[in-house]
Image: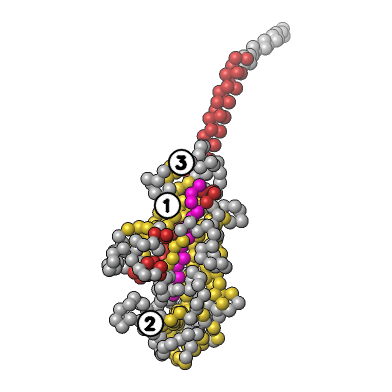
Amino acid sequence: MARKLKYVAARPSRTRGFTLVEMLIAITLGMLLVIGVSYAYLGTKQTSRMQASLARMQEGARFAFETMALDIRMAGAAGCSIVPLPPAPTTVNSYGTAYWFSDLFNQPLTGYENATATAPTTPQNVRTSVSTLSGHAASDALAVVLAEGGGGIIMGGNREYRVTAYTPNNFTVTPAPTALTSGELVVATNCQTPLLSVATVAGNVITTTGATAAYGPGSSIFGVTGNLFYIGVNTAGEPTLYRQHLTQSGGAPATVAQELVEGVEDMQIMYGVDTTPTADHVIDTYLNANDVAGAGVPGATTAEKWQRVLSVKVNLLMRSTEDGIISAPQDYHYPDPDSAATTPADRRLRRAFTTTIAVRNRL
């Protein structure tokens, strides 16, 4: 007899969801987690922006100091020493225009305190306009001139040439003066009578004016370079370290503005000066540009007073190019750590940097 199978319907399992309270707790915990992660991300991003801005400021200050140091260390270099030792050499300057680059032998280094307008004369002038941005007096400026030798560290290319033949004001040189252009300033020297003149270059011949001595084989000609460092405002509206670079235009010396480092808000310069009546080449004090030319520094002329400068102390106030880097305006002390605190109106990051550079040709 067949056995009947009995089918029993399965009882559905009892299921239950989250209660409203559990849902609220889960949402709250999730929101807290998202807020925490977001806060950490924003904090990390802000720290990263601050560190990047600080790194850019440090890199900019380092580049500015290295660029200025190349010139300052060699200020007044003229191929051979022109320090008045027996027999005293005679210097001849056939370029009489009174610009900052025109007196290599007597005043190759000149500072301008609060260079707000035309320092020195138009058209080779300095125009600074960041004093209203920094809250300080207008920034200083510094002009340096030197003869550049072999290697062309500053201008690039060989800038030193040996004289192989000479007739008055015509120098046949080797190698070919490919790094010189007609209209540039040059120094010719036999280590007794250095000559500063505008050059005309044709092949291997450099022609000058005003030569009063013989420059036979073994004499040298050097290209003259110069830079006037100052603070200006670039096309983006940022305070920037500029230099007026000595070059030539239309067969005559001229200058061209070159932007060096963005974000340099202020530059203050002090000069290490030997104030001993009989020069001993030891720094006695640091003075600003106006005081160097003042009564406290020995010398019958302004040029003689500036010859007493043995070192240059450069203070730069760097600022971030972006605003909102810090959460609140940051006080800073400038140019010295013991200077009164300044509170800016913005939230940019600022740092003060200082270096001291020796004028090697005077030590």
Residue 362 sits in quarter: bottom left
Say whether marks 3 and 1 touch (CB < 8 Å): no
Tell me where residue 106 appears, x and y as whole percent.
41, 73
Over which residues does the magenta segment extend?
135-147
Identified at 46% across, 65% down, the residue is 143
The label on residue 353 is 1
Q: Which residue is mark 2?
A: 90
Quarter containing the N terminus = top right
Q: Nearer the viewer, residue 39 or 179?
A: 179
Marks 3 and 1: which is nearer the front?
3
- Could you classify mark 2 by the number of other residues whose Cα lies within 10 Å: few (under 14), some (14-19), or many (20 or more)? some
Residue kind at label 3, given as amino acid type: Asp
Quick check: is 144 in the magenta stretch? yes
Image coloring type: secondary structure
Mark 2 secondary-structure assignment: loop
Counting every numbered tag in the picture gives: 3
Where 214 sits versus 29, above or below?
A: below
Say whether marks 2 and 1 touch (CB < 8 Å): no
Where 202 sits versus 156, above or below?
A: below
Asked whether residue 151 appears in the rendered view, the answer is no
Residue kind at label 2, given as amino acid type: Thr
The earlier-in-sequence mark between 3 and 1 is: 3
The alpha-carbon separation of the residues under discs 2 and 1 comes to: 41 Å
Where 32 sits versus 228, above or below?
A: above
Q: Nearer the viewer, residue 281 or 349?
A: 281
Identified at 55% across, 80% down, the residue is 182
The alpha-carbon separation of the residues under discs 3 and 1 comes to: 15 Å
Q: Nearer the viewer, residue 52 or 331?
A: 331
Q: Nearer the viewer, residue 142 or 40?
A: 142
Q: Which residue is mark 3?
A: 331
Asked whether residue 168 appears in the rendered view, the answer is yes
